[in-house]
Amino acid sequence: MQTANWQLPTAIIAALLLGLLLAMGLPTARLFPVGEVGDTAVALRFLPAETAGGTTYRWTSGDSALRLFGLNGAPGSVRVRLTAPDRPTAPLVFSYEGRTLAEVMPPNQWRRYTLLLPAPANPWFTPQLGLNGGQSAPTASDSRRLGVAVSDMQLRPLAGPHPWRLLERALLLVLALGVPLALLSQLIREPG
């Protein structure tokens, strides 16, 4: 009967952790500011941050991308706020996993574009939204080939996490907590 002393608390903790794990998997929208401190994990291959009119942003370089943290293998939607004050010479192409999602001429005022994203082909890696083209020609006052200015991105999963990701998290929690609890119960049961 010694083992019954730790089995019930372990089962209760495991049930609570599973409930917490399921609650963590509910889809929620996340806002990622671009141009603020710490945005380089999200904004890949962008030019340095700038501020104008109280808005921080980064210019795309022609081959920039936004990392889509939080999809967890599920389909989703992404909303990107951008502008191109100087009319670009080429359209902006939104791409995802090697496919073109949309091709637009960037606006000369701030506008939000919302795109639907299919579930990533490989749910174990963080997908990226490519922002290609849309560059303007250099001017007398600025020799850079600027793309579009991006100020933020909002990402919303349209479903819960991929079932395998959920199972992976559950197994990790069971190992992280179950094994130490079992070892602790052994030490308590057999002192010395």
Image (tube, rainbow, N blue to C red):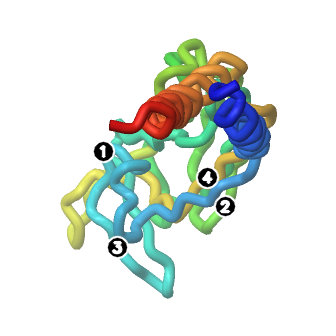
Tell me the crowding category of disc 4: few under 14, some 14 to 19, or many 20 or more residues within 10 angstroms, Cα based: many
Task: Tell me the distance, in whole angstroms, between the alpha carbons under discs 1 and 2.
Answer: 21 Å
Q: Where is residue 82 in the image (x, y as percent from the top left)?
A: 56, 58
Task: Tell me the distance, in whole angstroms, between the alpha carbons under discs 4 and 2.
Answer: 8 Å
* Numbered label attached to residue 45: 1
N-terminal label among 1 and 4: 1
Q: Do the residues labelled 2 and 3 touch (CB within 8 Å)?
A: no
Whether residue 157 is visible: no
N-terminal label among 2 and 3: 3
Residues 49 and 106: in front is: 49
Identify the residue at image location x=71%, y=40%.
9
Task: Tell me the distance, in whole angstroms, between the alpha carbons under discs 3 and 4.
Answer: 17 Å
Q: Is residue 1 above or below residue 188?
A: above
Residue 130 relative to residue 166: left or right: left
Task: Tell me the distance, in whole angstroms, between the alpha carbons under discs 1 and 4.
Answer: 16 Å
Residue bearing mark 2: 111
Q: Where is residue 103 in the image (x, y as percent from the top left)?
A: 61, 33
Residue 22 relative to residue 100: left or right: right
Residue bearing mark 4: 80
Identify the residue at image location x=64%, y=28%.
2
Which amino acid is tagged 3? Glu
Tell me the crowding category of disc 2: few under 14, some 14 to 19, or many 20 or more residues within 10 angstroms, Cα based: some
Q: Position of residue 65 (x, y in %)?
A: 42, 40
Whether residue 148 is visible: yes
**Residue lying farthest to the bottom in this orientation:** 53
